């Protein structure tokens, strides 16, 4: 179904303005998915604005003629679209998301931590060298599926590698739904090869270990407008905000790049649905075991063991599935510990700040 949403845009000042509004919003990543959630009255009273940064003291939002900090209130993260209530910004409505990277904090409250919203494509970056690791790639692909974001695997440093085929084959074998490309992250190649996912209005993000070429790729997409690497720093011990770059920034062609510390720290925690997607064949088999709590070990009527014996699944893939499931459990557990550690640290920092103010 295609619909013309132009009617939803306020015609204030004539057609030219409406067009300008639309194109400004388009370059911020406004898509029919969001437009169909609002009617004309909403749009006039509460113009759309996108969250480009989350600060401790509020949300930085950008829209057509909007570039401001609003107080905390809306449950939103970087990449979210708000209908900005000009009189009561804290009461602005968050539109339904196309996709969401999140973490569920385990423990009693199981609070949801929102990492990044409305990413269209996530580039999972690794290099054609010893960084390459199928198990790690699988983990990232599971995360992407869980977030409902399209994953594309990028194998960088192809220029330093004699034969990229084995890497490409191993990466492509992870899922039928996965595209994998080998390239040189430096120079003009990324602009050409990544074009299908980096058009105006698209939102992209990068996942991968340190040193694989994520910043180089962004720089290459920026033309020659260099992005300072390491430009984002966390609040320092005194609680001063030292971020120097927006977490959602825009390429000259109107493609949005989402880069948050949270994205870089994403673990497998809560990628359960993604794992099920990635190993849909094995997950389906697990559901057919005679016992609901089958450990796929010595139990009679185990569908997974049966498939293994028939050669329908390989022992290697089964081992990776087992490992992912185990890691997922481990990560969820260690997150609780990490969280309580963080809270204790924050309490200490606050106590120090208080003493300093006296
Ligand atoms: N020859 C070659 N060098 C590359 C390629 N990609 C990255 N490099 C180099 O590898 C180093 C690390 O690249 P970065 O872009 O900083 O890697 P990163 O993933 O952003 O690393 P972090 O910022 O630590 O997360 C730099 O010296 C790059 O010039 C590539 O495809 N070919
Ligand atoms: Zn079983």
Image (cartoon, rainbow, N blue to C red):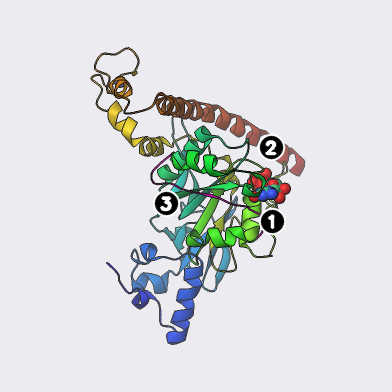
Looking at the rendered image, the quarter that the C terminus falls into is top right
- Please give the residue where the numbered disc 3 appears in the rendered image: 99
| Residue 107 visible, this angle | no
Q: Residue at x 35, y 15 (%)?
A: 297
- Please give the residue where the numbered disc 1 appears in the rendered image: 244
Q: Is 325 above or below relative to 70?
A: above
Mark 2–mark 1 Cα distance, whole angstroms, equals 22 Å
State whether label 1 is within 8 Å of ligand 1.
Answer: no
x and y percentages locating residue 295 in the rendered image: 34, 18
Front: mark 2 or 3 = 3
Mark 2–mark 3 Cα distance, whole angstroms, equals 34 Å
Q: Nearer the viewer, residue 200 or 185?
A: 185
Q: Which residues are drawn in magenta?
A: 174-187
Q: Are marks 1 and 3 in contact (CB under 8 Å)?
A: no
Q: Is 357 above or below relative to 301?
A: below
Q: Is residue 306 magenta?
A: no
Q: Residue at x 67, y 43 (%)?
A: 211
**Left or right: 207 as drawn, with respect to 286:** right
Where disc 2 sits, the SS reads: helix
Q: Nearer the viewer, residue 358 or 69?
A: 69
Dot placed on the residue nearer the N-terminal end, 2 or 3: 3
**Left or right: 291 as drawn, with respect to 173:** left
Image label count: 3
**Left or right: 354 as drawn, with respect to 200:** right
- Please give the residue where the numbered disc 2 appears in the rendered image: 349
Ligand 2 location (quadrant):
top left
x and y percentages locating residue 119 in the rendered image: 47, 54
Q: Is 111 above or below relative to 308?
A: below
Mark 1–mark 3 Cα distance, whole angstroms, equals 26 Å
């Amino acid at each position: 179904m295609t619909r013309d949403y132009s009617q939803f845009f306020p015609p204030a000042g004539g057609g030219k303005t409406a067009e300008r509004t639309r194109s400004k919003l388009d370059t911020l990543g406004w898509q029919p998915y969001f437009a169909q959630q609002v009617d004309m009255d909403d749009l006039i009273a509460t113009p759309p604005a996108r969250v480009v940064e989350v600060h401790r003291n509020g949300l930085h939002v950008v829209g057509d003629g909007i570039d401001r900090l609003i107080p905390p209130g809306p449950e939103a993260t970087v990449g979210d679209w708000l209908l900005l209530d000009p009189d009561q910004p804290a009461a602005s409505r968050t539109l339904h998301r196309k996709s969401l990277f999140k973490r569920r904090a385990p423990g009693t409250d199981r609070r949801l931590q929102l990492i990044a919203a409305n990413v269209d494509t996530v580039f999972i970056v690794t290099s054609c060298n010893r960084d390459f690791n199928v198990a790690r790639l699988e983990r990232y692909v599971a995360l992407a599926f869980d977030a409902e974001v399209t994953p594309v695997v990028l194998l960088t440093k192809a220029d330093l590698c004699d034969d990229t085929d084995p890497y490409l084959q191993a990466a492509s074998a992870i899922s039928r739904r996965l595209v994998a490309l080998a390239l040189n992250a430096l120079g003009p190649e990324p602009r050409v090869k990544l074009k299908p996912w980096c058009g105006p209005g698209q939102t992209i993000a990068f996942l991968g270990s340190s040193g694989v070429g994520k910043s180089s790729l962004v720089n290459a997409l920026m033309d020659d407008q260099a992005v300072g690497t390491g430009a984002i720093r966390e609040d320092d011990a005194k609680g001063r905000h030292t971020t120097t770059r927006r977490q959602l920034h825009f390429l000259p062609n109107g493609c949005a790049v989402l880069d948050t510390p949270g994205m870089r720290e994403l673990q497998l925690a809560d990628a359960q649905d993604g794992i099920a997607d990635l190993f849909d064949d094995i997950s389906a088999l697990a559901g057919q075991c005679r016992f609901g709590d089958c450990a796929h070990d010595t139990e009679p009527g185990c569908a997974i063991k049966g498939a293994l014996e028939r050669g329908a699944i390989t022992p290697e893939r089964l081992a990776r599935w087992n490992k992912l499931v185990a890691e997922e459990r481990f990560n969820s557990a260690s997150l609780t510990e990490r969280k309580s550690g963080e809270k204790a640290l924050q309490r200490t920092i606050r106590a120090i700040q208080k003493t300093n103010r006296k």
